[in-house]
Amino acid sequence: MKSYLMENGVKVFRYGEPIETGIIQGKMTATELNADLEIEFKKNNSSINLLLSPEDIVYGLGANLGGINKRGRTYESYCTDDPSHTEDKTKLYGAHNFFIISGDVSRGYFIDYPSMIKYDVGFKKTDILNIEITDENFTIYIIDGKSPSEVTSKFLTIIGRAYIPPKWGFGYFQSRWGYKDKGEILDIYNSFKENDIPIDGIYLDLDYMENFKDFSISDERFSDFKEFVTDLKKEGLYLVPIIDAGVKVEPGYDVYEEGIKGDHFCKDINGDPYVAAVWPGKVHFPDFLKDETQHWFGSKYKLLTDAGIEGVWNDMNEPAIFYDTKALDEAIEYAIESKGKNLDIHSFFSLKDKFTNLANKDAYYKSFYHLLGDKTLSNDEVHNLYGFYMTKSANLGLTKLLENKRFLLISRASSIGMHRFGGMWTGDNSSWWSHLELNIKMMPSLNMCGFFYTGADTGGFGGNCSGELLTRWLQFSVFTPLLRNHSAIGCRNQEPFSFDEQVTKNSKNIIKVRYRLLPYIYSEYMKAVSQYELMFKPLAFEYGESLAKETEDQLLFGNELMLTPVHSANQKGRYVFLPEKMAEITLGSESLEVEIKSDKIHYMDYGLENIKFYLRKNSILPLVRPSQNVKNMDTSMMDVVAYVDEKAHYTLLDDDGITYDFEKGEKFVTNISIEWKKDDYEINVSNNNSSVKELNFKVIDSRGNMTVKKINL
Amino acid sequence: MKSYLMENGVKVFRYGEPIETGIIQGKMTATELNADLEIEFKKNNSSINLLLSPEDIVYGLGANLGGINKRGRTYESYCTDDPSHTEDKTKLYGAHNFFIISGDVSRGYFIDYPSMIKYDVGFKKTDILNIEITDENFTIYIIDGKSPSEVTSKFLTIIGRAYIPPKWGFGYFQSRWGYKDKGEILDIYNSFKENDIPIDGIYLDLDYMENFKDFSISDERFSDFKEFVTDLKKEGLYLVPIIDAGVKVEPGYDVYEEGIKGDHFCKDINGDPYVAAVWPGKVHFPDFLKDETQHWFGSKYKLLTDAGIEGVWNDMNEPAIFYDTKALDEAIEYAIESKGKNLDIHSFFSLKDKFTNLANKDAYYKSFYHLLGDKTLSNDEVHNLYGFYMTKSANLGLTKLLENKRFLLISRASSIGMHRFGGMWTGDNSSWWSHLELNIKMMPSLNMCGFFYTGADTGGFGGNCSGELLTRWLQFSVFTPLLRNHSAIGCRNQEPFSFDEQVTKNSKNIIKVRYRLLPYIYSEYMKAVSQYELMFKPLAFEYGESLAKETEDQLLFGNELMLTPVHSANQKGRYVFLPEKMAEITLGSESLEVEIKSDKIHYMDYGLENIKFYLRKNSILPLVRPSQNVKNMDTSMMDVVAYVDEKAHYTLLDDDGITYDFEKGEKFVTNISIEWKKDDYEINVSNNNSSVKELNFKVIDSRGNMTVKKINL
């Protein structure tokens, strides 16, 4: 074991010979520490026990079930494609090994290790957080701070700045597995226009491919793809096609042939390309851990960028495996042996389980190999890096192909570290109210682990959504940077116009509010990412009240807002805890109401027709008029709502939204300050390159007095 | 169609030639009605559309997912064994076709029809409740009332009085699939005694049987069963064995042989006994719809009663079918054909689904037949009566065998009508917080459908329970008449002493509170059942406030209490809505605290160590000292807590708890009245046959003044 100090004071404990994951970006100092951790090295794993006092909250662990406070459950870090996210599941698609134990002081832990880690967060024993790491080679980073915010900031700093999508990536997106051809995509888009519902893009699921082949476009269903993409883009509508991890085994298919020729595929025990079966049947998995393979696969996105595509989603990259030939053959043999027998509970379930459990078996991940530097490692040993490096590969490719143009890139599987290369969605959720609640609770945990361009499939991917659930979900997800309504084939159609008229009307209004909020959301995104702060914060990150610590369905959003979404059926409102006096904002596509609420518990009426949230004291929120898409957004005229007793300041960050020129200082900055001076507000607006010309202010004070002012620049 | 009036004003609409289900007990008058319903008779079903106004609440539908208000979902009535009760499921184990549309007026509907009914309660269209009945032969009962309470009472009256268990059935019960032998049962019982945790019985799951054969007892694991049962019963501990619906096909096995000889089994299309496979492999299903079969199967319980058993649970009586030979052979053939093929998404899932979907196929239920009177009907046509008539069979048998002694009898599958013959548990739930919430919301719906002796598996059957979840669950389920902690083999042990010391301590305290409340719970049970009133009531049944109508996690219990259980993790309390001033009661095994709370919303602190609930104004709650079991309960000394401003009255009903003599008037009645007279409370207690000798009163008034008094009789 060796221990070091990092530049920002983070302590590093390095055990054995850890695999180089490429996650940590922060700099190590030469200072060696004379310290160790209490780790029990056992035969099959390394075990760490951390004491929890009764009042401690455990934050973090990214994409996982459970609440903001992770206590009382077990978790596993092992990227897994399991679409049934029931309460008892211990792992989802991501491996996010950062958590904070927060009590009188806060201490963060990051375990840099790419295979299975198991967490028991006070489940077996209430006061013990137990961690089991599968072997004895790993690095633990310990981050101390006075508050969880401080710890989080230090951690976000050492893992490096998160991915920044183009501004159109902050629009509303529609998606469905099952939009079968160009005609249907156009119909969907036209329905948005006819219903006057803003939209910035449509995701293309597997349906656009030829026989589920990566980097192929169905001639029959998507002929003249380039023209199609280009025409839509002119109107401001982006198509975002899917790419899977597995490459179809098919002699003559260019990607397959190149992969074989370039030795790009993971190997089996015999050194032959490993065969697994996914969508197209048999596939090989590119060995994304190899630099050459990253570059090769990344370059293949050219087929899409040549057609005008500027965004993709990487899927099935845990990697998901439906079966491998050996396991399938075994199952079939078992079935043959069972023929004619009188199977009782034991023998019957043995047979059934052979087929039911074919997907994603542990054995598969132990039976194929990567080349990392000069080491051959089983996928199991580096399992959690696969989606990360696929996304890095796409990022490298797209960066080269699109030059200075930003692109939309999200992935299903992820590890911390991937956040620098792309965003993520939270995977194949369901049209369940509990998954809306999960979406709410997961957002701060994802931010803590570096993921900012993220969100859940609004309305739920699997299952049939009700109009009420879609509406309630939108009321929350209009705040998530990634806003996508996605549903599975065979389920009820989930576009905002596929329900009652009332649902269409309400959804339209709510999505338009997203576009009203977009400058603020974009500005807060850029600040969070560049200043290493959370965009979605638990109340307890800023408020010390006991109730703040256990409130899990209210979130601070940016520095100005508190969100209080409704997440259960047949409700006309919800209980809200106000840790301090706040202004309740009711926002419609054309309307804006403000009312001061006292610092106590309330029952807030919250209907389906608009958005409600809270504006904190001495805070300013800028809004624009809703537009059909980001391209057509007009920021010359703004509404500004503010709650000011003494003084408030807001810096609205903007840029071209398209290129990386903002990194060279090409920013549009609007500074707004409001101060109460004796008998009136003094408002100052400075405009640095921004297009803002006219601002209409509504300023309220704690007594509820409203001042209306207009400022022209 | 013919329409009639019932004696209590219920309207009856009889379409076609309905199957005689035996559900309705109320008397028809000779009055024919000149009325009809708007029913659309289609090719494959009969369809009814009922208009819902925005404010209407839909109550009822018994054992189903969703909330107290059933709007926004679809449901199916078709008893089904599906242990994964995720939010999207449309059917559980029961078929409870009674619901109320409650707005300015309330109207109840009961559909007397024993096969599939589908409900869309404002899911596809917000304002339409659509019902699809599979054919055109059914009876609809329409019950009008000013309030949902009035409608419910009328309905409960026409379906007849609910089953009444012995008083020991109101104790705490432990259960687990996997208690392998007598030794383990004894260990469990001894641990309860060592830990001083009250218990009245242990359920025996399949483990006690010989090769899963009904009415067999493993010689190896449960030798000298009678002695075992009798010894435990002497101490007040009852064993409650399971009986399954399917009878193992095994020549020489008496139940099988008698069934064949007596022609008691359901037939296949060729007239041979139908073969399905369940736990023991191949089984036949008794045709419980035949009187002779009911009596024959009922008489078989003698094996158990002869050993001293006084309670059983009927399981797998939807009936659950793992597979039938035809479907299994087809699946195996399909597997053989798939051998060596490169299966893509479509062909692979076709194969996998062949095995995954083997259980409980629609086709099975259409391929075996019952004899009802002189009609041969497929199980599908009378599907929902199967569990009902199995339980009726057990009831008839046990009544004959045990004579005037009451017995504990519960069933997994149920239909309205079965409530007269036995109770039910809510089936194979999971150790999920959402299933605790479901338990809370389901109780009033079950009561509305006639089920009073009911409850969920506390702590959850499947999956691993946390100590916190068990504790929170107990805090609610100590109010449910059926209180059973049950868990599945392979899951974490779930006895109150299988967790932290703190969990043991808290569980003990909470279970002891159950025993303190037992006289009240028993009294309220007897009142609810005999007066056709709900024991668990939605707030909106008594309070008109808008918030009462949408509050789904607070329940009125009896006429005196309001329950406000905590049902999420890591919470120190919860929001509570008090529609009027109430007394907050904090009850431990030895402690009792009372505090007046004003009529508004509160955040209630609710720890894990005791029970909290609310006592309504001018109400009285009697309590006893906790005992080790019901047998040892001492009712001579009572604590009485009351919240009285003017006057209050409580009638405590009691009886021997063992026989049916209460039906002949053999009741023990204690009348307690408290009245504020100028400057003191006047307390009167009359004692009719009851053993109550000493009462210690704590009476609080709205200003919080406490009066303590003792009364000796």
Image (tube, coloured by chain):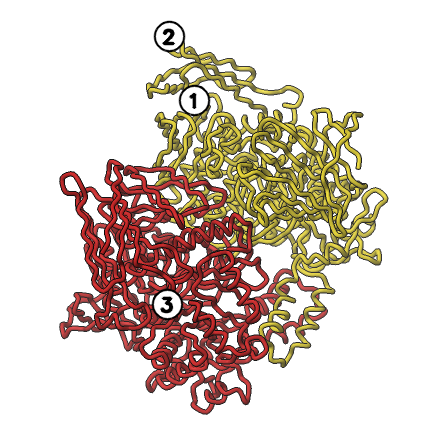
Chain colours: A yellow, B red
Residue A61: image tag: none
Which of the two discs, 2 and 3, sits closer to the camera? 3
Q: What residue type is labelled 1?
A: Lys
Callout 1: SS: loop
Packing grade of label 2 (10 A; few <14, some 14-19, many >=20) is few
Residue A662 rendering spot, x and y as whole percentages: 63, 23
Which of the two discs, 1 and 3, sits closer to the camera? 3
Q: Is residue B110 left or right of residue B467?
A: left
Callout 2: SS: loop
Q: What residue type is labelled 3?
A: Gly
- Residue B30 visible in the shown view: yes
Packing grade of label 1 (10 A; few <14, some 14-19, many >=20) is many
**Viewer-closest of B444 and A644:** B444
Q: What residue type is labelled 2?
A: Lys
| Tally of numbered discs | 3
Q: Which residue lies furthest to the right in this view?
A: A374
**Viewer-closest of A170 and A90:** A90
Quadrant in which the C terminus of chain B appears? bottom left
Q: Residue furthest bottom?
A: B261
Residue hosting label 1: A617
Callout 3: SS: strand
Packing grade of label 3 (10 A; few <14, some 14-19, many >=20) is many
* Residue under the image location 80 percent in, 25 percent down: A30
Whether residue A537 is situated above or below residue B345 in the rendered picture = above
Residue hosting label 2: A678
Tell me which chain the residue with mark 3 is part of: B
**Viewer-closest of B685 and B569:** B685
Tell me which chain the residue with mark 1 is part of: A
Residue hosting label 3: B423
Q: Which residue lies furthest to the front in this view?
A: B712
Tell me which chain the residue with mark 2 is part of: A
Do the residues indicated by labels 1 and 2 lie within the same chain of the protein? yes
